[in-house]
Image (cartoon, rainbow, N blue to C red):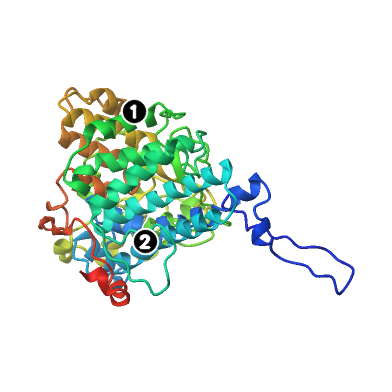
Amino acid sequence: MFLMVGLIFSAGCTKLDEEYFDQIPAENYPENADQIATLSVNAYKKLQNMADDNGWWFLAQSISGDGLCGPTRGADWFDGGKWVDVHTHRWTNDTESVNRMWSLFWEGITVCNQTIGQLKMIEPSEQITAKMGELEVLRSFFYYLLIDNYGNVPYVTEVLDPNALPLKVERSVIYDSLIMTIEKNISGLNPSNLKYMATKNMANALLAKLYINAEIYTGTAQWEKAEQYCDSVIAGPYSLVNDVKSPFATNNENNAEIIFSIPYDENNFQGFRLHMRTLHYQHNLTFDMPVGPWNGFAVVPTFFDTYEDNDLRKEAHFIWGPQYTHTGDPIIESVTGEPLNIDPHLPALSMTDGYTPEQIRTTGARIGKYEIKKGAKENLSNDFPLFRLSDFYLMKAECEIRLGNSGDEWVNPIRTRAGVETYSGCTLDQLLAERGREMFVEGHRRQDLIRFNKWKNSWWEKEAHGSDMNTFPIPQWAIDGNPNLGN
């Protein structure tokens, strides 16, 4: 659906004075159900920038946590300190990821509002009403990310005058409105297993996410409601797959575990370049790539060590040890002249004096969770799962434990699939660790650490701090444009 350029209508003619149009007059559009369906395309396209340069996924949600980092490698990857500042929680309202993420969410909200406004101008019908409901749920998804990351923000549900200066609204008030909006529309949403749309199943997943974080957003826990919607997701048309790798394969668009995803394509829907950011400069030889990677992101060594050696996810998620070409020959590191061997134990900054620049080039396990196919280009074609069934199994387990029950029934299928021993009496600390291993680099870690009250703790290369860092500051440029945002 995202590959549709749009509907362009023109009349072929032989008379030079014949009047023709490149658009359908507003009063005649849409003419059929297919045209109604295309009205939401631009809103979904705003998901395209979620997983790369615009701050949400790998910067604000992943590098800010305890599992991923962007180490400085000699003259490479310092970039004004933006990777270190996010990992160590020293961001400001002028940090790049803080700026870009704010814009990303508002672009999605704005296009949803614009499209809903267009639909309101069309003669009402069952299809129009359903499309409006779908867009309100998609807008709620963007708002869920906005309040999760920024707290109190303006709540805008219509197209405003360009000179409007909306006030901030309490996060708890927006939360209540999002719940009401989604629950109002859910019965009219498409019930099918369509992974690129705000379907009924996606709405159930979104409600489960809102309710499980209710205590953070409002001060009042809603574990029973969260569990109710986890149950709805689990009862949907999804199932755990046997292979830990398949939800992240290049051709994962029909994976039985994925609920809602971004349909990346290396040529036609670009924006997913994790492999370029993590692989060693010469890993193009391993994957027969026509481009050279950038030798960046690495796994935090203390997080790497949380995986048992027999955990199938360890090999599936990480790249370390001796490295070979796609023909099986050892890769010779271009600087040292020695066989390339990736040491997973990246040195902390305080230890780098004991490491040579050459060693720093080749330390830190790299990320292989999302399949890097042979011949991969600069952009991957893997769909990026925003909601995945495993997450809701673990959320169900969390709700049970917090309600005083056992969560083993829901966490153990995840561990069994990973090839590790099951739990008997899983604790919240064990569950958080399991969520880290299972949901690694899927965009959930920051939120999990906050909900489990671990966000302010110290971890590798990060000192402990107060809870005032639970949300990001509104960008200074946004405050300059609307002083109400600074109040």
Q: How many marks?
A: 2
Q: Is residue 98 visible?
A: yes
Look at 59% across and 47% down and name the residue there.
37
Say the numbered circle drawn on residue 295: 2
The kind of secondary structure element at disc 1 is: helix
Q: Residue at x 28, y 54 (%)?
A: 147
Q: Position of residue 153 (x, y in %)?
A: 28, 61
> What residue is rendered at 15% in x and 37% in y?
429
Q: x, y (%) of residue 461?
A: 16, 58
Q: Secondary structure at mark 2?
A: loop
Above or below 180: residue 148: below
Q: In the drawing, does residue 319 fall left or right of residue 5?
A: left
Amino acid type, mark 1 = Asp
Dot 2 alpha-carbon crowd within 10 angstroms: few under 14, some 14 to 19, many 20 or more: many
Q: 255 or 39: nearer the eye? A: 39
Residue 394's quadrant in the figure? Answer: top left
Residue at 65 percent across and 46 percent down: it is 34
Q: Position of residue 115 (x, y in %)?
A: 51, 57
Frontmost residue, 271 versus 380: 271
The amino acid at mark 2 is Asn
Name, please, the residue furthest toward the front: 123
Q: What label sits on residue 231 in the rendered view?
A: 1
Q: Residue furthest bottom?
A: 480
For the C terminus, which image quadrant?
bottom left
In the rendered image, is residue 363 in sight? no
Q: Is residue 174 left or right of residue 284?
A: left
Residue 486 in percent (x, y) is at: 22, 70
